[in-house]
Image: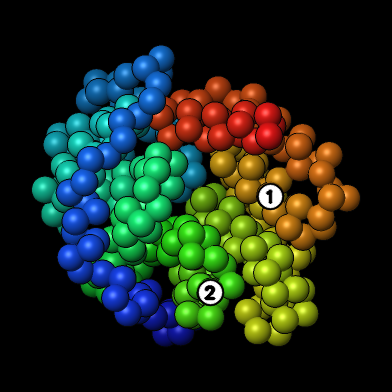
Amino acid sequence: MATQDFQPLSLLPPGCHGPATDAAAAMHWVPFPYDDMPRFDARNLPAQWPRLHAGHAAPAPTVPALVDGWAMYHNGEFAQAAALGLQLGAEGLTLANQATAVYANYLEPRESVRLALLLQVAERAAGQAAVEPDNCHALFWEAYALGRYAQGISVARALAQGLGGKVKLALERVIALQPRHADAHLALGAFHAEVIDKVGPLVGRMTYGVRAETALALFERGLGLNPDSASGWMEYGRGLLMLEGDARLADAMALYEKAAALAPADARERLDVELARAGLRD
């Protein structure tokens, strides 16, 4: 994709930002529910950094306060990590956005607050991308937040608002800038599958440029880059069901079993593994 074709994702639905979003940030965040994970700090985090960030190959931080903030994130202290990230200004935005988005997606029980937090992430990341159009982290977390928001309001409604095209464009831009960004491949694969599931393969291809074979290739590429991604194996399983229905149920279950069997390396991965286990029970 040519650089000049990209426009930052700065257009959110009317009325989806401002006081309500700010109020959501100030509300109590549910604590991470598990206490049996290894703890990270400034001493042991650097050695684990490549494994923990295999999904997007982010460079390890060198600013001591930022190292502390990422340790909080990997320990499941999402509220503290987000608050510290915001205090650190521009260099802490990725931490703040990742902590907020992960918390909203996995732990926030109040739907209105969850959606407000996701839009808060999208707004912050949009502002960052407007200033730094080649910042993969800003682009990815904006796309992630808008994608999860779209699922919350229904994918069909989000497509009607034009959010789908913005998510797709941003993820494609991330992959163009950083071809080994595993999480972007997986998220874009999920996007192709979701759209096909909602509007059908013909409309999906003609209107949104999505294809089943592209979705499958993206899942394979993303998991080839990061085979320890429990969320990736689950997305692949969901994708198979959306694309091919119950005929692939056994395959989808096998992918969920693979996710459930992984040894989580941090708090977010623990949440993914528990989600996979819950999916198998259901």
Query: Which residue appears farthest toward the right when viewing the image?
Result: 247
Q: Residue 159: which quarter of the image?
A: bottom right
| Count of marks, rendered view | 2
Q: Mark 1 and mark 2: span between their CA atoms?
A: 20 Å
Going from N to C along the chain, the mark reached first, 1 or 2, is 2
Rendering coords of residue 201 (x, y %): 77, 74
The amino acid pointed to by label 2 is Arg
Give whichever of 217, 250 is nearer the camera. Answer: 250
| Residue 69 in sight here | yes
Residue wearing tag 2: 157
Residue sitting at 77 percent across and 79 percent down? 202
Q: Is residue 38 left or right of 223 when viewed as pictured?
A: left
Question: Comparing marks 1 and 2, which lies closer to the viewer?
Answer: 2
Q: Is residue 136 left or right of 60 when viewed as pictured?
A: right
Q: Is residue 67 left or right of 201 when viewed as pictured?
A: left
Residue sitting at 20 percent across and 32 percent down? 68
Judge whether 19 appears above or below 159 on screen: above
| Residue 173 in sight here | no
Q: Quadrant of the C terminus?
A: top right
Rendering coords of residue 40 (x, y %): 30, 23
What kind of element bears circle 1? helix
The amino acid pointed to by label 1 is Arg
Rendering coords of residue 246 (x, y %): 84, 50
Judge whether 255 appears above or below 190 on screen: above
Label drawn at residue 238: 1
What kind of element bears circle 2? helix
Q: Residue 249: which quarter of the image?
A: top right
Query: Which residue appears farthest toward the left when viewing the image?
Result: 87
Q: Residue 192: which quarter of the image?
A: bottom right
